[in-house]
Image (spheres, coloured by chain):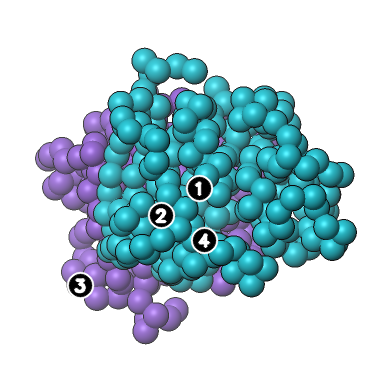
Chain colours: A purple, B cyan
Amino acid sequence: MSRTRVHSLLVSSDGYAAGDHVTFEKPIGDAGALFGRFDGRVIHGIHGVEEPVTVDNALFSMWGQGVGAEIMGRRKFGPQTGEWPDDGWTGWWGDAPPFRTPVFVLTHHPRDVIEFDNGTSFHFVDASPEEALRLAQTAAGGLDVRIGGGPSTVSEFLKADLVDFLHLAIVPIVLGAGVRIWDDLAGLEERFSVESISTASGLTHQLWNRNPHHPR
Amino acid sequence: MSRTRVHSLLVSSDGYAAGDHVTFEKPIGDAGALFGRFDGRVIHGIHGVEEPVTVDNALFSMWGQGVGAEIMGRRKFGPQTGEWPDDGWTGWWGDAPPFRTPVFVLTHHPRDVIEFDNGTSFHFVDASPEEALRLAQTAAGGLDVRIGGGPSTVSEFLKADLVDFLHLAIVPIVLGAGVRIWDDLAGLEERFSVESISTASGLTHQLWNRNPHHPR
C-alpha cells in the first residue's frame, strides 16, 4: 500500500504555517519563529543530531521513512514568480538537497529537469494535484509520496482528498499573519482519525490518519 | 558522535521485561502479553505497516535509524544453554533476520560466524560489555550501536554505564513473574534526563538520555 503523506507541518496557534514576504533571504517569509524548535538534521533519522533524542525528534524523523518521491509548491523551491529568470537558481539547498528522491515542483512555467548526485531531481510540472500525484507515485516505485508543502500546496491536496496521513506540529506562538492552513477545510476531521500528543517542549503533535471508510 | 542505544524495551507495570521459561515455541517465555501493542514490522520505518501511523509506531520506528551493529544476549539468539548443540539453529528469524548489520552475541561458548544475504551476521563472543562494545563500534563504522536485549543484557550494560540512550515502553499489565529490569539499578535516573509521554494505546514511553555531565 502506497500512502500520500505530509510530515512536520509546523502551524502557529492562530493557524499560520508559513509567513508572507518570502525572499531569497527569508525562505519561509516572516514565520521563522515556527521553526525555533525544529532541527532539520533529524529528517533522515534521530542519529542525525547530537542533541538528546526527544519525542519531538522521534516524530520529526518519520519524514524520510519509505518515501520515494515528493511533491512541492513552486514557492518552496524558490521565491521567483512568473517566467523563470535565467539566474542559475537550483533551490535553497545547495549541492546536496535533502530529498534524495525525485521531486515534482508544481508550476505553470515548466523548465528542464535539475539533477543532483545524491538522488535528488527536480521535475517542473504544470499539473493538477491528481496528475502530479500519479507522476509521483510512478516515480516512487511503490514507496510513499510526500506532499512537501508549502502550506497552500498541502491545503490544495487536502481539499482534493488526496492525503492519507498528516503529521502536524502546533507551535504555541501567535504569528498574526502568514499563510493560513485551515481555510475552506471545515469538517476535515470527519475524514480522519486524529491522535494528539503534547511534548515537553510545548509542541502538540497531531497525527491525522485517513479513516478506512473514506478510501480514495 | 556514536551512541549506544536501547530501543523498544517493553516493561510491565511491575518491572518485568521478558518471561521465564523460554523455549523454542516461546521466544520471550511467559511474557508474550508485553508484545500485544507492538508491531515488529515497524522497526525499519512507519511505511512497514498498513495500520494507521500512531505515535507508538513512530517511536518504535527509531529502532533501525543509523544503527551499524547490535549486541545481544545469548538468550535472545536461542533457548539453548551450555555447549551449542549441532542442531543447525541460526536464530529465531528465518532466512532474513531483521538486523541487516553485524550482531554480536554474548556467550561463553564461541562458535563460527553465521552470515545472511541481507547484511545480517552473527558473531559469537565471550567478552565483557566493554569489550563487546568496542567490537561492535568498530563493526558499526561510525554509526550507532544498539544493545538489543534481552533485559538482563540491557541491565548489564546499564550497570556498566555504557548506555547513552534508552527507549522504554511501559505496558499497563501486571505479569507477576519474569526477568526483572530494575534490580541493582537504584538511582539510575541521576545519570539521565528522562522524557515521558503516554499515548492513546495506554503505553507510556520513556526516553532516557545520558546527561552531558556524565560522559563515558
Residue A15: give x, y in percent of width and height. 18, 50
Mark 2–mark 1 distance (CA, rounded to whole Å): 9 Å
Q: Which residue carries the number 4 mark? A: B20
Does label 1 or label 4 sit earlier along the sequence? 4
Q: Which residue carries the number 3 mark? A: A187
**What kind of element bears circle 3?**
loop
Residue B16, numbered label: 2
- Residue B210 placement, left or right of A86: left
| Label 1 vs label 4, nearer the camera | 4
The answer for which chain carries disc 4 is B
Task: Residue type at mark 2: give it.
Answer: Tyr
Mark 3–mark 4 distance (CA, rounded to whole Å): 51 Å
Mark 1–mark 4 distance (CA, rounded to whole Å): 12 Å
The answer for which chain carries disc 3 is A
Which residue is pictured at 35% across the width and 76% down the height?
Answer: A211
Question: How many C-alpha atoms fall within 10 Å of the one at disc 4: few (<14), some, or many (≥20)?
Answer: some
Q: Are marks 3 and 2 on the same chain?
A: no
Task: Residue type at mark 1: give it.
Answer: Pro
Residue B86: give x, y in percent of width and height. 87, 59
Task: Residue type at mark 4: give it.
Answer: Asp
**Which corner quadrant of the image does residue A184 belong to?**
bottom left
Residue extending farthest to the bottom is: A213
